[in-house]
Image (tube, rainbow, N blue to C red):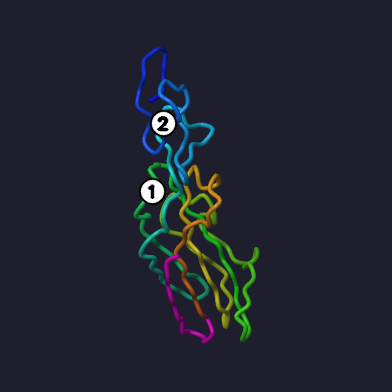
Amino acid sequence: MSRRQQECFPCPEHSYTQEEGSTVCHCEEAYYRTAQDSPSSACTRPPSAPVNPVYSMKQSTVIIEWGPPEDSGGRGDVSYSIVCSRCSGPSGQCEPCGSSVGFVPQQTGLVDRTVTVVNLLPHTNYTFQVESLNGVSGLSPWQRQYAQINVSTSLAGKWNFHARFM
């Protein structure tokens, strides 16, 4: 129970207090509030990974779409970011795609669950991680949740895809 102007109220969801009559409710482990969240608002957590990624390919462009995470973390501000890696050689060593690959409408801060990736090179292996984020993702020490898609452009006109969830 927390005290507001001499009245006691239960702590918001996923928060607790050390003693009755306390004016502060602390977030449970792995739950957070942003600086903009009211002290009387529930504590929330980062979202789970996006689900069911699908793709379509045309020439040097791939369109990736996905479903919302099964768990939004209790927040309504879920957005998405795309991490692109180019992998080569027998070791499969990967490096960031760099500025030659473009993202429409953008690579980070996506609200709609679709992105078009342009300027992919032929005979190249790409890995795309679609991350789910919300207002407290940056407060968590845990790795962000993502769905991963591997795209191989190793043969002209033939594309191989593999998707997995992390």
- Rendered view: 150 above or below 107: below
Q: Residues within 10 Å of mark 1 (few under 14, many from 20)?
A: many
* x 65%, y 63%: residue: 99
* x 45%, y 23%: residue: 22
**Quadrant of the frame with the C terminus:** bottom left
Query: Residue 116 in magenta?
Result: no
Label 1 – label 2 distance at C-alpha: 16 Å
Residue 74 location, x and y as percent? 38, 43
Q: Residues within 10 Å of mark 2 (few under 14, many from 20)?
A: some
Residue 82 location, x and y as percent? 52, 60
* Residue 120 lies in quadrant: bottom right
Residue hosting label 1? 72
Q: Give the range drawn in magenta.
A: 153-166
Is the C-beta separation of discs 1 and 2 under 8 Å? no
Query: Residue 162 in magenta?
Result: yes
Residue 103 location, x and y as percent? 54, 60
In the image, which is nearer the foreground, mark 1 or mark 2? 2
| Main SS class of the magenta portion in the image | strand
* x 46%, y 84%: residue: 158
* Residue 54 lies in quadrant: bottom left
Q: Nearer the viewer, residue 58 or 136?
A: 136
Q: Name the amino acid, label 2.
A: Ser
Residue hosting label 2? 41
Residue 100 location, x and y as percent? 64, 67
| Disc nearer the start of the sequence (1/2) | 2
- Rendered view: 101 above or below 12: below
- Rendered view: 29 above or below 154: above
